[in-house]
Image: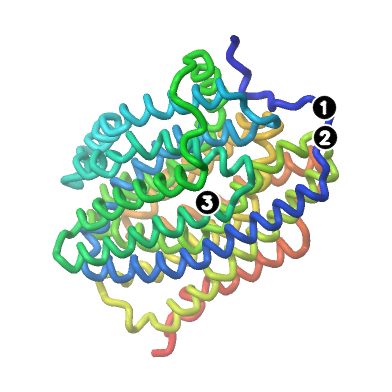
Amino acid sequence: MTMSDPQQPETSGQHPAPATPLSRHMLAGGTILAVRQWFGAALGVGGVAVITGLIGAAAFGLYAAAAAIVGLLWMMIPTAIVGALVRRQHEPKTEAWRGAVLLLLLCGVAAPAVAFLAGTVLERWSRLDGVALATAALMAPAVFAWPAQAAVARLERGLDYLAIARADLLGQTAFVTIGCLLAWAGWGTWALIVAGICHHLLAAALALRAAGGLPARAGCASEARRLAGEAAALASVSATWQARPLIVPLVVGWAWGAAAVGQVALAMRVVETLSAARGAANRVATAALPRLVDDAPAMRAAIARTAAIASWATAAPLALTALAVAALRAWIPPEWSACGSVFPGLAAFSIVAGLHAPCVSALVVIGRWRGVCLMHLGIVATIAAVALLAVPPLGPLGYAVAELSALPWFAYAWWTCRRAFGPPFSVLGLAGVLFGAALGAAPWWWPGGLG
């Protein structure tokens, strides 16, 4: 059995999927995930506010550095493998599921050691003591949680977003509850590490239960090799995007220390939590767009619809939070005062990324993943370069400037998608970006707040 070319999507060209029923599934799935993300956002922001207030900026900065490495490895391996399974136009055979479980299991066993090595390199560069051990501990659940992602792939192929949302939300609830209790008990950084371990284990267990267990037993090495080849493209796309959070400990930590990393990381965590609809839109697009690849008008309509949902679902919570931050700035503790100045730049970047997320998924589906990788590399390189220049004199604010400087790179996704399928954005989607950008900048244009 030969390895498949990751540039070519699996399409038959003979039986195009009916557009209308699938569009309803996409809209229903996107709505379920968006509602889950709004509930999760309220829970996550409240929980992070309590935990960070108890452990302090420096302890949170250490956790953020470890989480950046763990997040990169998650995106490169299990997320890419799940994406390869979900993007297949036809239902994978039993041998494919067995190969997926085997590949995820082998990678999960090796992941903690790889995380420890990466954490050691980051610790020596940034002088953030304890990152290596924290990273290895946070990655430890991969031995169980990564093989369980095969069950998540089966749920996503069935568009069972209610089960996925339930597992995610309960896992997040465990994270916040355990993190708050341990932070109150004085565990510092390890309150979040232990909470993260419990989160991954519980979410994996719930996904397994919802899917009725693993799709198959581990085996079929030939299918594992084939799947690894298919996932390589998605891993490249994911890795080049997920490298962005590593810039914070690498540059901000190097220039200003763990406390500054904690301030920027908290603002980024809040923005990413409130922007979770962007991930929901990407998950829906990942499962649905491959079935529309032979129907350009239906593909364009699906992209536009998903982009509009992602735009407003990202912009609305970020805008309201920005107004609250601006109004209540006088009540923000001095240790976290830089978060308010960083928030607008990160929010604007996230809103624009949310609008373009369905375009990126569509480009990967039609084999343009190399161009997407170059776009992501351009974004990361621009942020890193500008941050190196702006962070030393400006402090955490310099990182917000760096993210804003990378926004022009998204024009590639818009232009390429437009040439392939037609205009990908509706007026409604673009209006969400303008709304979010204007109100999201409130901490900048309303510096005095309520006094």
Residue 281 picture location, percent across and down: 62, 52
Residue situated in front as seen by the camera: 159 or 7: 159
Q: Residues within 10 Å of mark 1 (few under 14, many from 20)?
A: few
Residue 341 picture location, percent across and down: 41, 69
Distance between the alpha carbons at the discs numbered 3 and 1: 30 Å
What residue did someone put label 1 on? 13
Distance between the alpha carbons at the discs numbered 2 and 3: 27 Å
Do the residues under discs 2 and 3 have CB atoms within 8 angstroms?
A: no
Q: Residue furthest bottom?
A: 451
- Quarter of the image for the N terminus: give it: top right
Which callout, 3 or 1, points to the residue nearer the camera?
Answer: 3
Q: Is residue 55 visible?
A: no
What residue did someone put label 3 on? 164
- Quarter of the image for the C terminus: give it: bottom left
Is 432 left, or right, of 114 in this rendering? right
Residue 212 picture location, percent across and down: 50, 41
Q: Residues within 10 Å of mark 3 (few under 14, many from 20)?
A: many
What residue did someone put label 2 on? 16
Distance between the alpha carbons at the discs numbered 2 and 1: 7 Å
Q: Which amino acid does the dot numbered 1 rest on?
A: Gly
N-terminal of the pair, mark 2 or mark 3, is 2
- Disc 2, SS: loop
- Disc 1, SS: loop
Residue 230, compared with residue 299, is above or below; it is above
Q: Residue at x 57, y 52 (%)?
A: 407
Residue situated in front as seen by the camera: 398 or 421: 421
N-terminal of the pair, mark 3 or mark 1, is 1
Do the residues under discs 2 and 1 have CB atoms within 8 angstroms?
A: yes
Q: Residues within 10 Å of mark 2 (few under 14, many from 20)?
A: some
Q: Residue at x 29, y 35 (%)?
A: 115
Q: Residue at x 57, y 74 (%)?
A: 439
Q: Which amino acid does the dot numbered 3 rest on?
A: Ile
